Image (cartoon, rainbow, N blue to C red):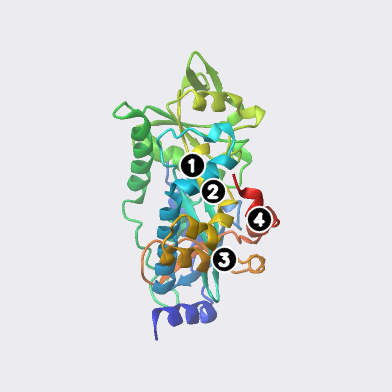
Amino acid sequence: MTHHTRAAACNRDCRCLTTNRAALHGALETGLSPQTADLVAARPLLFADSAVFVSAAEVARMGAVIAAVERVAALPGYRDTMLSLAPPSAQRDPGPLGAFLSYDFHLTGDGPRLIEVNTNAGGALLGAAVARAQAMCCQGPMASPGLAGLEATLFAMFRSEWQRQRGDAALRRVAIVDDRPETQFLYPEFLLFRDLFTQQGVEAVIVDGAALDYHGGVLRAEGQAIDLVYNRLCDFPLTEPNHAALAQAYADGAVVVTPHPHAHALRADKRALILLTDDALLADWDVAAADRNAALGAAVKLAEVDSDEPTIAIIRPRIYRVPVLINPTNRSRTLRRQVRGLTRENISA
């Protein structure tokens, strides 16, 4: 049996409930913010109790699509077109690439479909926590590859983002910013990130974007100067009035923001999906036939995104049993509403 057919058989036949919620609660309870465990327990739909199996062929397919999209996104024609659609706040490239850039795939019977590129993807630390709390299932041990040293890798990503704009200057204080963060469904993860920064010797605060203050060339939260903003806002261009202080500090280069409006405009604007699946336009940009086929082959099919099949991102080539976050159907419907009606003509510069 091939990896692909084995994964399909596992998804069809495995009925195991593999998430050990007691172990998950215990692990979270021993962290720097023990209240995280209770917050997660109060969100029973945050994690699925069962797993999704992904074949090596599907992993390879997703990797090929990501590589093709990245090559297209580096082309002047693509960049000029996307920036022509973007607001003034997104025109400047401040240097950082954008933390937690995510390619979201919808798994279908015809293979993975790219439904979204997300520049402020959540769930990494929560996903790691639940992956470490997996029990045995009928397919054998629930191995979780890639978890060793994950927290250090994630911190290194933030340090790299900082250094791309600030060089060797010391990173002293981070603000994790969202609207009314305590009310957010993923607030437990904000606590985990605060703990992560603290463990690495960097002060961190969780703050409402409206509570930031900017004067004298310094962005402040709770009266303390902020060096880097881990941006979890859904105001991607930073144009809402409540975020004026952050927007001005970002525009002045007074604070490092990641992810930032420029990264969103180039990768996560949903209109990019139209460009990536326009074969004639890609050919005009001299995109190689193989990359055009990869992009077109992964085109979102709007008729499919209402299904209950999960969205998932996989990074290593083998069959995985992957804990899945909350059912993504609502997000997919949002995507359909955003994409419907867009044409090549109304996104042209």
Label 3 environment density (alpha carbons within 10 Å; few <14, some 14–19, many ≥20): some
Residue indicated by mark 1? 263
Q: Quadrant of residue 204?
A: top left
Residue at 56% x, 43% y is 187
How far apart are the alpha carbons under marks 4 and 1? 23 Å
Residue at 57% x, 66% y is 310
Residue 337: % across, % down: 70, 55
How far apart are the alpha carbons under marks 1 and 3? 26 Å
Residue indicated by mark 3? 310
Residue 31: % across, % down: 42, 44
Side of 109 relative to 313 (left or right): right
Decide: marks 2, 1 in contact (CB < 8 A)? yes
Check disc 1 and give the amino acid type: Ala
How far apart are the alpha carbons under marks 3 and 2? 20 Å
Q: Earlier in the sequence, mark 1 or mark 3?
A: 1
- The quarter of the rendered structure image containing the N terminus is bottom left
Label 1 environment density (alpha carbons within 10 Å; few <14, some 14–19, many ≥20): many
Residue indicated by mark 4? 343
How far apart are the alpha carbons under marks 2 and 4? 17 Å
Residue indicated by mark 2? 268
Check disc 3 and give the amino acid type: Pro
Decide: marks 3, 4 in contact (CB < 8 A)? no
Residue 133: % across, % down: 44, 60
- Which mark, by number, is residue 293? none
Residue sitting nearer the eye, 313 or 190: 313
Q: Secondary structure at mark 1?
A: helix
Check disc 4 and give the amino acid type: Thr
